[in-house]
Image (tube, helix red, strand yellow):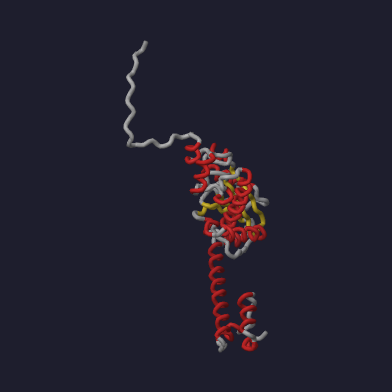
Amino acid sequence: MRAEDLRQTPVSELQRLYGDEARDLPSGGLSALKDDPRAGARAVAERIQRRNSKAQAEGRRLTRLSAFEQPLWDQGLVHVGGADEVGMAPLAGPVIAAAVILRPGTRILGINDSKQLTPEEREALEPEIRAAAIAVGIGRAEVHEIDTINIYHAGMLALRRAVLALDPQPQHLLVDARRLKDLPYPQQPIIKGDAKSITIGAASIVAKVHRDRLMARLDLEHPGYGFAAHKGYPTPEHLEALERLGACALHRRSFAPVARKLGLIPVQQDLFAPPEPRRPQQGNR
């Protein structure tokens, strides 16, 4: 179809082809639609312009999101890895980390810090990330490890396991605000890296989707707590279930709400209660 043919095309057909199906206009087609005397045709032109503007803005965002990776790719480093962990704050379940190596120049529309995305957006992006990846690694730190070495070190452990699961191993590693020990390649910790690096953002999405699916499966093994819904986070529903049912094997004993329920730490005393009377001391016999 030529640009001059657009004026003979019914508006409903223009809406279907270039609005709904987003087909490419012929050369000069956008100008022709903007000058079309039919209001419906001009509305199609406005819709196309908005879509183009949104795509251009997304392209600029993705360019900024690759600001850490692109210089490394330009140096010829093919295996640039990004790593991130999720599940640090929940009262239950393991910490999950993911590491991702994307092919140089990868652009995935919509990729972002997993916390900025809806569950549906994350589920849609996760297979795209895996398809565009050279390698994906998953690591986890179990509940007993969290309770033994503390949550910070458990997060580091999960990250290290995820990176070591990559095949091939990265030539350079980008990590969200961390530096991992005893790895033989350069690392770059980036504050809020999941919102600034495409590989770290991709890792955060993969880790979040993996953990959400895991908690949904564990919900079947430990019913009544609502793990499939709140994923172990301290929501009012979770705290109510913890109070009603007690702790299960998934709960982190080192976290205060769980420890209090198990009697591992005392409930805070009333600071304004009168002191208990002192008992007279008995002498030595």
Residue 235, image x and y in percent? 50, 49
| Quarter of the image with the C terminus in it | top left
Q: Is residue 55 above or below residue 37?
A: above
Give the residue at x 58% y 80%: 44
Q: Position of residue 58 (x, y in %)?
A: 55, 68
Instruction: Say which quadrant the N terminus sits in.
Output: bottom right
Using the image, determine if residue 92 lies above or below residue 28.
above
- The reply to whether residue 237 is visible in this rendering is yes
The picture quadrant where one finds residue 27 is bottom right
> Whole-percent x and y of residue 230?
54, 50
Nearer the observer, 9 or 96: 9
Residue 68 visible? The answer is no
- Residue drawn at x 62%, y 63% is 106
Residue beneath the point at 52% across and 44% down: 241
The image quarter containing residue 51 is bottom right
Depth order, front residue of 227/192: 227
